[in-house]
Image (spheres, rainbow, N blue to C red):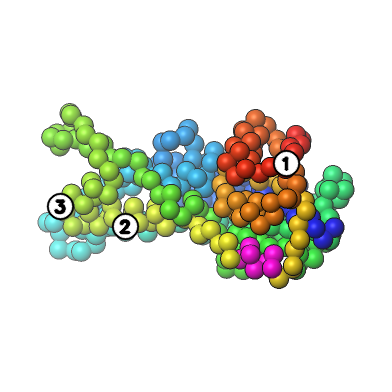
């Protein structure tokens, strides 16, 4: 039906056994591009950054990440500039998110050649419906023959230089830095905001290295592009009565859901959920944005 909108997340590709998990699939590709275990050092808020990768990108922990600089203290006795600025070069050698992302997405796309359609989705999907696809792959197009013009790849798609991954812009909150007040390795230790600590570093090379490291972490954001969504819905003159959400964690990308609820206040939302965490995320979002007409289906 032309009045039905599907929101498709990573759970959809996982249901087709595509290798699109952050752990181990993206993790394995990312480690190919790092000299150190950059992402394992990135934060300490959760046991593993891979548990909620995009959201946790907004919480870098310099207390761990500064280990990248071990052994690269500037050597002022040397005549070679490289013996002083090598600490800065370590930033370029780590945290190469885009390289890993494109290889990860291409690998998942290649796997489409080996999968078949799923009878559940053959019954559930609608060839006349519209699709907001948060995945990079073309599972809808290649496996279910959904017309291209009815699909919006809101985070980009394989084959185009437009893949998006990151924390929501504006949510950057690095962990506070703990430093040795007497600088003798015995404490006492004090807590200070990361940027304030960096600004207090007197050594030019060390300060620059920390500045560039924090700026790299800050760059791991994705913009919320409501204009793209609005243009897609306007172009297709969508008069949506039903919104079906499958495979999206509902733990990020809130502004898109908020916009759809405002644009289609009478639409019925149907959420497919798997597990307690997913169900709690959905219930939280329903309450937060006052989605008045909804149902959940456990799978």
Task: Please tell me which residue is depicted at 73% across the width and 50% down the height of the picture.
Answer: 266
What range of the chain is rendered magenta? 228-234
Secondary element at image label 3 = loop
Marks 1 and 3, how far apart in space?
A: 57 Å
Quarter-of-image position of residue 86 = bottom left
Q: In the rendered image, is residue 296 in sight?
A: yes
Which label was assigned to residue 187? Answer: none
Helix, strand or loop for the magenta stretch, by majority: helix
Which label was assigned to residue 212? Answer: 2
Q: Nearer the viewer, residue 272 or 241?
A: 241
Q: Would you say residue 229 sits in the magenta stretch?
A: yes
Q: Quadrant of the N terminus?
A: bottom right
Task: Please tell me which residue is depicted at 64% across the width and 68% down the height of the picture.
Answer: 231
Mark 3 lies on residue: 202
Precedes in sequence: disc 2 or disc 3: 3
Q: In the rendered image, is residue 133 in sight?
A: no
> Label 1: few (<14), some or many (≥20) within 10 Å?
some
Marks 2 and 3, how far apart in space?
A: 15 Å
Which label was assigned to residue 294? Answer: 1
Does 159 sit above or below residue 35?
A: below
Q: Quadrant of the C terminus?
A: top right
């Amino acid at each position: 039906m032309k009045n039905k909108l599907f929101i498709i997340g990573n759970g959809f590709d996982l249901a087709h056994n595509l290798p699109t998990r952050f752990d181990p699939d993206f993790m394995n590709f990312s480690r190919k591009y790092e000299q150190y275990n950059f992402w394992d050092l990135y934060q300490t808020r959760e046991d593993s950054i891979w548990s909620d990768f995009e959201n946790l990108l907004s919480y870098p922990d310099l207390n761990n990440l500064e280990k990248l600089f071990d052994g690269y203290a500037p050597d002022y006795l040397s005549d070679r500039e490289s013996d002083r600025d090598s600490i800065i070069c370590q930033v370029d050698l780590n945290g190469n998110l885009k390289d890993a992302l494109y290889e990860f997405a291409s690998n998942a796309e290649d796997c489409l050649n080996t999968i078949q359609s799923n009878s559940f989705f053959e019954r559930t999907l609608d060839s006349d419906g519209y699709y907001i696809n948060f995945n990079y792959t073309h599972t809808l197009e290649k496996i279910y023959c959904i017309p291209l013009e009815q699909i919006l790849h809101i985070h980009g798609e394989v084959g185009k230089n437009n893949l998006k991954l990151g924390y929501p812009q504006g949510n950057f909150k690095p962990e506070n830095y703990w430093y040795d007040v007497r600088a003798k390795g015995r404490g006492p230790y004090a807590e200070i905001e990361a940027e304030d600590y960096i600004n207090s570093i007197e050594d030019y090379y060390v300060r620059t290295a920390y500045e560039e490291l924090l700026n790299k972490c800050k760059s791991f954001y994705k913009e919320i592009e409501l204009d793209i969504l609005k243009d897609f819905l306007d172009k297709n003159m969508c008069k949506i009565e039903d919104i079906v959400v499958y495979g999206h964690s509902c733990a990020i990308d809130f502004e898109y859901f908020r916009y759809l609820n405002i644009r289609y206040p009478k639409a019925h939302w149907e959420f497919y959920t798997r597990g307690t965490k997913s169900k709690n995320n959905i219930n939280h979002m329903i309450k937060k944005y006052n989605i008045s007409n909804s149902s959940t289906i456990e799978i």
